[in-house]
Structure formats: structure tokens, C-alpha cells
Image (spheres, rainbow, N blue to C red):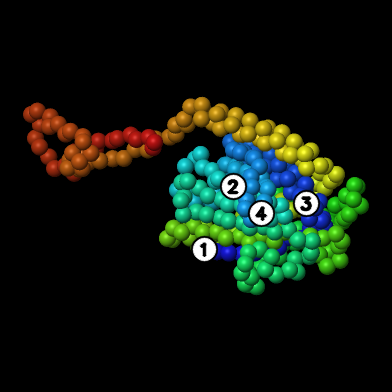
Amino acid sequence: MLMKEYRICMPLTVDEYKIGQLYMISKHSSEQSGGGEGVEVVRNEPCTDPKHGAGQITEKRIYLNSKLPTWIRKFVPMAFYITETAWNFYPYTITEYTCSFLPRFHVKIETSFENDNGCSENVVGDDPTPKDSVCFLDILNDPIPDKHYKKAEDLSNWVSQKTGRGPLVDGWRNTTKPIMCSYKRVTCSFEIYGFQGRTEDFIHRNIRDILLVGHRQAVAWIDEWHGMTLEQVREYERKQQEDTNSKLKSDITRTDSAPPMRPSFTRSISVTDESSLKKMGVKTVDIPGSPSCPSSLKSPVRLNSTPE
């Protein structure tokens, strides 16, 4: 089991991000869906908790086979998805990831949002996170994968027309107002001998990238969501989920109905040993009237095979 606490600051208030988070997640999920992969929303409904009160529970299926490294892809089915279950009791949330195909895989993310620059300790949970497990992520300077980079989301060039904020400059976390921080305690486990260490490292690397990209987008898209009411952003969320589910199901149906691809090449093997032929279920026939001869001198039997 590997645990880390990520702290990601943004030039927003906690109240503002209640809307921005919902908008960002919906739009980001839509952008990442296509080609039979992406996010399918299974349920999104109100819930209550004795400790945290009223909230929202969301269950999603995340299809991502092509995003897996080759050494994992060998062991999972093509229609591979991870189930995400999230409980939103803003400003506190819990998100869990599981996979029925990999019962020993589990990721849990506990999040608390605070109006500070990441300076608070013991924000998430009862026990303080060890200092060597705390990671500050900088949405301005930390690198993200090239495939996720967009100039319009580069916060060194960003200026909000609605709020007048931006661009961000070096040292912004200590000088920018307003400022808030997402405190995220992430625990992941993949208890399969021989794969645990590198799989848990792979999970944390991807979570790091997702957190950086998502929080950058929430800020870069502020002019799209700032000023929306909770009812308006929930309606936007509902429409995006309908469109995403429809697109994903259409792609999956098209893939399932396509005829299976059969390799266009064949390979051949030569077998000359009689005992080997018998083991393969091939009967040997002696030609009447012909003298017997050693198997090493018999003409080889050539078998053509196509890999299935």
C-alpha cells in the first residue's frame, strides 16, 4: 500500500470552486470520451451521511484499456473499465476506484478544500501525513504530458475577463489573492506479487497528472463557469453526462458489431519425426511396396497454421 498527500493551490475561493469543480469534471470527462473509451455515468443522485450530512453520490465507469502500459494490458480484457464511486459532501469528498477484474486493486482519495496556500497540517483524516509523503503540485510550473498541453490552458498566459485574475507568475502561491488549496490524501494498493510496486507507482504518476491537468483547467475555464448557480451547473452536468454516455455506448456498440479481424499472414512448420506427428494427431501411412526408411529421410510434412 502506498499513500501520498497532494496539495494543489488555485487562485480561487472554496465557495467558487464548488461550482468550478463540477463544471471542470463534466467538461473534462466529455473531452476524454471517444473511440470506445472514456467516462460513463451510471448514477448521480443525492445522498446523506450521519457525519457529513447531505451530499451527492456519483458512480462512473472509466474505460481506459489503451491508456494502460503494455505489461498490464496483457492481463486485462479489452472491455476493461474501472469503477469510480464518489461521495461529494463539499468541502469534503471521498472517491474510490475499484475493478471487478482485479479484486486486489483499490484507490481511495480523501479531499478537503481550505482557503489557504497549502500551509495547514492534518487537514485530511485523524493522523497527520508524514512530511516525506506530502507533495505540492504547482499548476503553473509542474510539467504535464505533452498530449494534455493546450496553450489556452497555460496559466502563464491566462487572464480572466470576468474576474481580472491572471496571469500567474513564479512565486504566485505566496502572493496571489484569493487562494485556496485542495488537500488530497491518496491511498492505493495492488496486492499482487511481482506487480505491486510498479503498479502502485504507475497509479500515483497518473493521479499526479490528472490532478495537475484538472486543476489547471478549472482555473483556465473560469470565465465559462464563474457566476453559474448550483442549479445551472447541475443542469450542465446532466446534459454533458447524457452526451458522453450516448457517445461512449455508440462507440462500444460499433466495436462489438464489427467482424473480428483475422490475421492475413500464416506461418508454417516442418515436421519430419513420425513420433512427433503421432503426438499431434497426424496419422502416418506407409506406401505399399515401398521399402521402409529412417524417419530422417522421409519427406517432411508441412503444416500451415494461422494464429487465433
Q: Residue at x 55, y 59 (%)?
A: 188
Q: Nearer the viewer, residue 86 or 200?
A: 86
Q: Nearer the viewer, residue 101 or 146?
A: 101
Specify few, some or many for label 1: CA neighbours under 10 Å numbering under 14, 14-19, or 20 or more: few
Residue topped by disc 4: 52
Q: Dot 3 lies on which element?
A: helix
Q: Is residue 64 visible?
A: no
Residue 156 percent coordinates (x, y) = 83, 56
Q: CA distance from mark 4 to mark 2?
A: 17 Å
Location of residue 49 with respect to 260 vertically, above or below:
below
Q: How many numbered circles does the render carry?
A: 4
Residue 140 percent coordinates (x, y) = 78, 59
- Say which amino acid is labelled 2: Thr
Q: Earlier in the sequence, mark 1 or mark 4?
A: 1
Q: CA distance from mark 4 to mark 3?
A: 19 Å
- Say which amino acid is labelled 4: His
Q: Residue furthest front?
A: 50
Residue topped by disc 3: 17
Q: Earlier in the sequence, mark 4 or mark 3?
A: 3
Q: Dot 2 lies on which element?
A: strand
Q: Nearer the viewer, residue 265 or 94?
A: 94
Q: CA distance from mark 1 to mark 3?
A: 31 Å
Residue 177: image quadrant is bottom right
Relative side of 155 to 1, left or right = right
Q: Earlier in the sequence, mark 4 or mark 2?
A: 4
Q: Earlier in the sequence, mark 2 or mark 3?
A: 3
Q: CA distance from mark 2 to mark 3?
A: 20 Å
Q: Are marks 4 and 3 in contact (CB under 8 Å)?
A: no
